[in-house]
Amino acid sequence: MLGKNLKKIRKQKGLTQAKLAELANVNRRYYQEIEACRKNPTVVVTARLRKALKCDWLEVLKGI
């Protein structure tokens, strides 16, 4: 669910996976795995992604 939320927000912001990974200082391949729901990010990584997306925690965690 977290990966789906991140993907939705990323697309709304007009960012590519590579650009978001760069902004959040996260490995691009690791981010792809998160978005595909194959990896679960740590709280620290989730916080960096949220900050890079400039969105609220509630938006990121919606439905979880």
Image (cartoon, grey):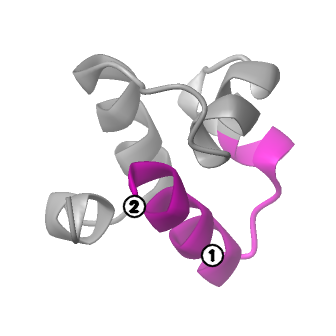
Q: Which residue is mark 1?
A: 13
Say which mark, if any, is on residue 53.
none
Q: Position of residue 10 (x, y in %)?
A: 62, 65
Say which mark, if any, is on residue 54.
2
Q: Earlier in the sequence, mark 1 or mark 2?
A: 1
In-front residue for pair 42/1: 1
User: Residue at image x 74%, y 75%?
Assistant: 14
User: Residue at image x 60%, y 32%?
Assistant: 38
> What segment carries the magenta color?
1-20
Which amino acid type is shown beneath numbered disc 2? Lys
Q: Secondary structure at mark 1?
A: loop
Q: Quadrant of the N terminus?
A: bottom left
Residue 8, magenta (yes or no): yes
Q: Position of residue 21 (x, y in %)?
A: 69, 34
Q: Secondary structure at mark 2?
A: loop
Which amino acid type is shown beneath numbered disc 1? Lys
Indicate left or right for 17 with 33 as reference: right
Residue 34 image-quadrant placement: top right
Magenta stretch: dominant secondary structure? helix
Give the Cα separation between the discs numbered 1 and 2: 9 Å
Indicate left or right for 18 with 23 as reference: right
Residue 9, magenta (yes or no): yes
